[in-house]
Image (cartoon, rainbow, N blue to C red):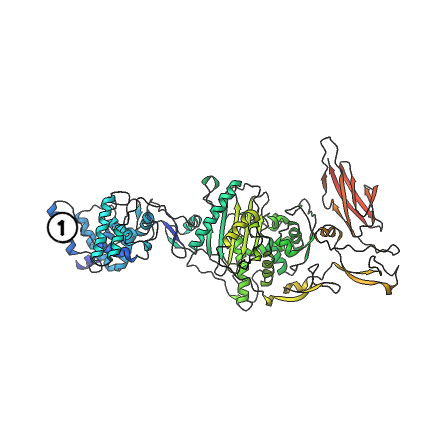
């Protein structure tokens, strides 16, 4: 019988006392509450607490169970006194339950409060005392005690009644919460205030009489007012809360979020949202990453808009058109592969690839522009030409290594528009990639010029999850350190918004490698910036994809980016990765490796792979007469009187636009009239350049407008003869513009110069 009773006693207590659904709770890296989602049963029941504040612990023991740490689960003296008083009065006036017994009663919810039930609770309480320590039992009580209404547990009660964590409660606030579980349905804030106040003050008097609090603390405590109604719980990172709830429902999760930074960023987002919504732009998102730990410091999934404008949508991981935000990846890839030097001139002229005709944002052309400037100014035409020269499949391979999960199709699906927003990506993946590039550069300089194998790792917002960068190797992961450094150095020169346009004049200015992007139709505006310590990513737009005039990266997203960076500590600029670089002579005018005839050379550090780039193709050795005004050769001048000099000369079409950029650019001198000129192709169409179909508009009176043909010639003084379908129509000299009104249909334009060089172009005229 004894053995049977012992076995029954041993198994009398369920393994899990409480199985009620719990709220999902997230906290910042300092344990401050960021937000919570109510439990499935409609109760604010936080996950079990890990720490009981000393003030509340003192209050609850003084009020409920002074001998908690001394009894075996029940207190015979209290039970005897309760029975005596209840019998003498003929009704239940007093309870004799210990905290341990109350834990058992809470776990057996719904049971009638009879003497038989009390006996069961007593037995189970002693069994609980054998299973758990006193502190563990007290934590169970604190976590599951009712505090009135739909509030369960100390943590939820502290936030709902006092809008702060339990560890920050005063003596009066702790005493208020300590007396609530005794009769939570009768006395709670907003109901029976007088009875609640009396019970709280009696407890405070007891603490004072027992010399737990001094006289001043007692007087100040009883003077404190009671809470009148519950507060709403904080919603500091609501979209991160929803994201975490999908995989950690009913858990308390400590995140990597810096609470103060998150709150300050929320205020900045609200300020900008109030301005943007005047232009019917309703959504924006912000992500801040720590480069060195790859932790998420700030997560703002959307603006404080309304349900009509998809307030609950977390845009950070949603695919959006990339605009120009991928350009740094192409620039770094071309540097990494040795196809480009940072200052190499790239053509910037009207360009057409089949039916695709990219244009610069400002609709102008520079003729030729240094690659780093093309990146910093986000010029579209040079970017597309760079992609075409580099190869679409080669670039797509780099993007594939970055693991941009929204690139779901092959390279040919996107075509050359890939670099201008023809593909989609999301703020998470893009910010992760920028952070990985910054991390690659940091680790290379900190680890004897080696690379981590898992540098492009996923960031983490879980506090206890450490990011694994892999092992160190001599081989690069994706980009080499020098290519990243040169890319970031170019991005540092991007023109900042008007409010920060003079940033470099201040000692406190922050060097930031940053890039903006604007998608076709003004639907998405991006800005992402990186330093040695932080990456800040911004997206602005409308969640439903509606475009708006003025929705441009530099005007809408960039101001938010720099406001966020002002909240962050200043970072030092990246150290130059000398082990991946070498110093060579560079032609200052072209940016290519200097040839033997370059007349203006400077030493510059380039990436080691840049050694295989060709020497400058734009410097030519020109033979001049004694006046230096004409080209000559052996056919017209004695070799001893010829002066040979290096001359910087661009192809005619590039030169035509480049002259507007550089007033010091000089065309090649003409040949002296008595010299036999060298015959070579020296002219290109300016308009039409590559267009096949041309529409001729009509005036209001029905007159068809003329088509003005333009040709750039390396020797403008040459005479050009113009033909349409083998019919001679006229000639030009110096300025080679020719107006015609062709008939509707297909035509062949032919231009021949006085040296016999010929240029043809097929067009279709539509009226």
Asked if residue 492 lies left or right of residue 104, the reply is right
How many numbered marks have been drawn onto this rendered protein structure? 1
- Residue, disc 1: 83
Instruction: List x then y, in percent, for residue 588.
Output: 69, 61
Q: Residues within 10 Å of mark 1 (few under 14, many from 20)?
A: some
206 or 425: nearer the viewer: 206
Q: If the image is split into quadrants, where does the C terminus sit?
A: top right
Residue 431, percent from left and from top: 52, 54
Tell me the quadrant of the picture where the N terminus can be found.
bottom left
Q: Is residue 425 visible to us here?
A: no
Q: Residue furthest bottom?
A: 448
The foreground one among 27 and 8 is 27
Answer whether residue 105 is magenta in the image.
no
Nearest the camera: 536 or 503? 503
Q: Which residue in the rendered view is the most extreme toward the top?
A: 701
Asked if the stretch drawn in magenta spans residue 570, the answer is yes
Which residue is at the far left? 88
In the rendered image, residue 495, in percent from the top left (x then y), is placed at 60, 53
SS for dot 1: helix
Residue 475 location (% of width, % of height):
57, 65
Q: Which residues are magenta?
A: 568-574
Q: Where is residue 189, by image quadrant?
A: top left
* Residue 744 appears left or right of 286: right
């Amino acid at each position: 019988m004894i053995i049977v009773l012992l076995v029954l006693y041993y198994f009398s207590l369920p393994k899990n006392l409480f199985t009620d659904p719990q709220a999902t709770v997230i906290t910042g890296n300092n344990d401050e509450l960021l937000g919570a989602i109510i439990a499935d049963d409609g109760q604010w029941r936080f996950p079990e607490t890990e720490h009981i504040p000393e003030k509340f612990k003192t209050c609850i023991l003084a009020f409920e169970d002074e001998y908690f740490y001394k009894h075996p689960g029940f207190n015979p003296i209290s039970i005897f006194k309760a029975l005596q008083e209840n019998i003498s009065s003929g009704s239940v006036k007093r309870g004799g339950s210990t905290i341990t017994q109350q834990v058992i009663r809470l776990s057996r919810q719904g049971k009638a409060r009879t003497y038989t039930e009390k006996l069961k609770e007593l037995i189970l309480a002693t069994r609980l005392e054998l299973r758990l320590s006193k502190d563990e039992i007290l934590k169970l009580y604190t976590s599951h005690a009712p505090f009135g209404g739909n509030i369960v547990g100390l943590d939820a009660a502290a936030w709902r009644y006092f809008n702060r964590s339990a560890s920050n409660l005063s003596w009066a606030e702790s005493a208020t919460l300590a007396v609530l579980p005794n009769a939570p349905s009768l006395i709670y804030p907003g109901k029976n205030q007088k009875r609640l106040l009396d019970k709280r003050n009696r407890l405070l008097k007891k603490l004072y009489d027992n010399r737990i609090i001094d006289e001043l603390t007692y007087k100040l405590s009883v003077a404190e007012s009671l809470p009148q109604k519950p507060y709403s719980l904080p919603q500091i990172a609501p979209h991160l809360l929803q994201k975490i709830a999908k995989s950690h429902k009913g858990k308390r999760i400590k995140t990597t979020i810096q609470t103060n930074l998150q709150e300050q960023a929320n205020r900045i987002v609200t300020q900008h949202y109030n301005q943007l919504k005047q232009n019917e732009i309703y959504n924006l998102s912000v992500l801040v990453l720590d480069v060195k730990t790859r932790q998420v410091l700030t997560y703002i999934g959307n603006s404080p808009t309304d349900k009509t404008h998809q307030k609950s949508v977390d845009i950070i991981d949603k695919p959006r058109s990339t605009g120009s935000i991928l350009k740094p990846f192409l620039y770094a890839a071309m540097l990494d592969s040795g196809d480009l030097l940072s200052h190499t001139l790239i053509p910037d002229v009207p360009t057409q690839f089949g039916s695709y005709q990219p244009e610069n944002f400002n609709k102008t052309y520079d003729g030729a522009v240094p690659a780093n400037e093309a990146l910093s100014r986000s010029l579209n035409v040079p970017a597309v030409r760079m992609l075409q020269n580099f190869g679409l499949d080669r670039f797509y391979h780099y993007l594939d290594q970055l693991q941009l999960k929204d690139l779901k199709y092959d390279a040919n699906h996107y075509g050359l528009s890939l670099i201008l927003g023809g593909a989609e990506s999301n703020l998470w993946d893009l910010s992760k990639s920028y952070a990985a590039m910054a991390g690659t550069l940091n680790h290379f300089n900190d680890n004897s010029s080696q690379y981590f194998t898992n540098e492009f790792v996923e960031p983490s917002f879980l506090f206890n999850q450490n990011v694994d960068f892999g092992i160190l190797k001599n081989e690069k992961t994706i980009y080499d350190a020098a290519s990243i450094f040169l890319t970031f150095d170019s991005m540092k020169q991007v023109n900042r918004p008007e409010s920060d346009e003079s940033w470099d004049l201040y000692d406190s200015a922050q060097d930031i490698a940053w890039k903006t992007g604007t998608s076709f139709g003004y639907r998405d505006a991006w800005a992402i910036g990186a330093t040695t310590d932080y990456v800040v990513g911004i997206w602005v737009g409308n969640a439903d994809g509606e475009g708006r005039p003025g929705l441009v990266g530099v005007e809408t997203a960039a101001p938010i980016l720099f406001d966020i960076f002002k909240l962050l500590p200043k970072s030092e600029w990246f150290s130059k990765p000398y082990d991946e670089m070498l110093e060579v002579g560079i032609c200052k005018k072209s940016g290519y490796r200097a040839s033997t005839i370059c007349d203006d050379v400077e030493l510059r550090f380039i990436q080691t792979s840049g050694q295989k780039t060709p020497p400058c193709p734009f410097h030519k050795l020109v033979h001049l007469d004694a006046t230096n005004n004409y080209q000559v050769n052996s056919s017209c001048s004695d070799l001893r009187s010829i002066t040979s000099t290096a001359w910087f000369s661009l192809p005619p079409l590039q030169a035509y636009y480049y002259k507007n950029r550089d007033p010091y650019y000089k065309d090649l001198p003409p040949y002296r009239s008595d010299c036999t000129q060298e015959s070579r192709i020296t002219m290109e169409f300016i308009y039409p350049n590559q267009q096949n179909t041309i529409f001729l508009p009509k005036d209001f009176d029905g007159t068809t407008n003329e088509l003005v043909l333009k040709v750039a010639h390396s020797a403008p003084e040459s005479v050009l003869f113009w033909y349409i379908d083998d019919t001679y129509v006229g000639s030009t000299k110096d300025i080679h513009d020719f107006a015609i009104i062709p008939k509707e249909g297909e035509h062949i334009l032919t231009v021949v110069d006085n040296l016999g060089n010929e240029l043809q172009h097929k067009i279709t005229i539509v009226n």
